[in-house]
Amino acid sequence: MREIWEEIKTDSESGARRLIAEYGDRLYAAALLLSPGAADAEELVFRTFERAVSRIDQFKPSGGFYGWLYVIMLNFRRMDLRKNQPDVVSVGTTASLPEVADTSFMDVLSGVDAEAIRGAIRRIPCYLAEVLVLRFFEGWSMEEMAETLGIPVGTVKSRLHHAKAAFRTAFLDAPAGIAEVKHDR
């Protein structure tokens, strides 16, 4: 079977359908953790797929395709955050969380409302939220995150450490129904 990126290059319509079928749910689950709500997450995923199809020639087969898509999505999210500072959003979606890939940190949250977890993730700075999502919901290694995000492994470890602390604080201090999105780096 041909790779998705090859199919997009030869038949963009068929390739786009396959792209959505294979990566739509996974990318949406990650976008939902980083976005203020379901509509924003859907738009983020749509823009990501649109950009991926239109710029498929920029994909380097030596790297991971999902990682490439994820970076496109993160870049769009970062642009959105820069445009909308400061941003207070209502937390309204009731969709369940994606399956947790690494339970070493998240198992303390078993039985906790998915929206409370999502709200806490949204209240921490984006650069911390993205490593938290990649590690605990996507199951990526430190090396994979460093390569994909273009930062040293030590920086990933540091961000992950700070992300856990920020998440705990955001989770414990969560006001009911409102999530404040912080944009500082």
Image: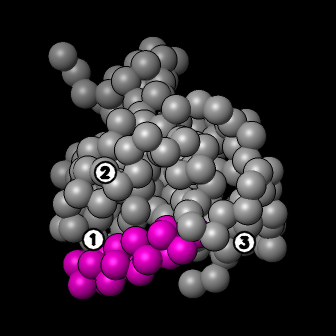
Q: Is residue 82 left or right of residue 51?
A: right
| Residue sitting at x 40%, y 71% | 164
Split into 4 quadrants, where in the image is the N terminus?
Answer: top left
Q: How many marks?
A: 3
Q: Which numbered circle lies on residue 57?
A: none
Three-letter amino acid code at disc 3? Arg
Which mark sits nearer the N-terminus, 3 or 1?
Answer: 3
Q: Is residue 144 above or below residue 99?
A: below
Q: Residue at x 63, y 54 (%)?
A: 119
Q: Which mark is residue 107?
A: 2
The kind of residue tagged 2 is: Asp
- Residue at x 64%, y 82% (from the top left corner): 184
Q: Nearer the viewer, mark 2 or mark 1?
A: 2
**Mark closest to the chain's N terminus, 3 or 2:** 3
Which of the image's four quarters has the C terminus? bottom right
- What is the magenta segment's predominant secondary structure? helix
Q: Residues within 10 Å of mark 2 (few under 14, many from 20)?
A: few
Q: Is residue 136 above or below residue 66?
A: below
Q: Which mark is residue 82?
A: 3
| Membership of 49 in magenta stretch | no
Of the image marks 2 and 1, the number of the one nearer the N terminus = 2
Q: Looking at the picture, which amino acid does disc 1 mark?
A: Ala
Disc 1: which residue: 146
What x and y, as percent, mark residue 161?
A: 34, 78
Q: Residues within 10 Å of mark 3 (few under 14, many from 20)?
A: few
Q: Where are the magenta residues, as a range?
A: 151-170
Q: Secondary structure at mark 2?
A: helix
How far, Cα to Cα, is label 3 from label 1? 23 Å
Q: Quadrant of residue 34?
A: bottom right
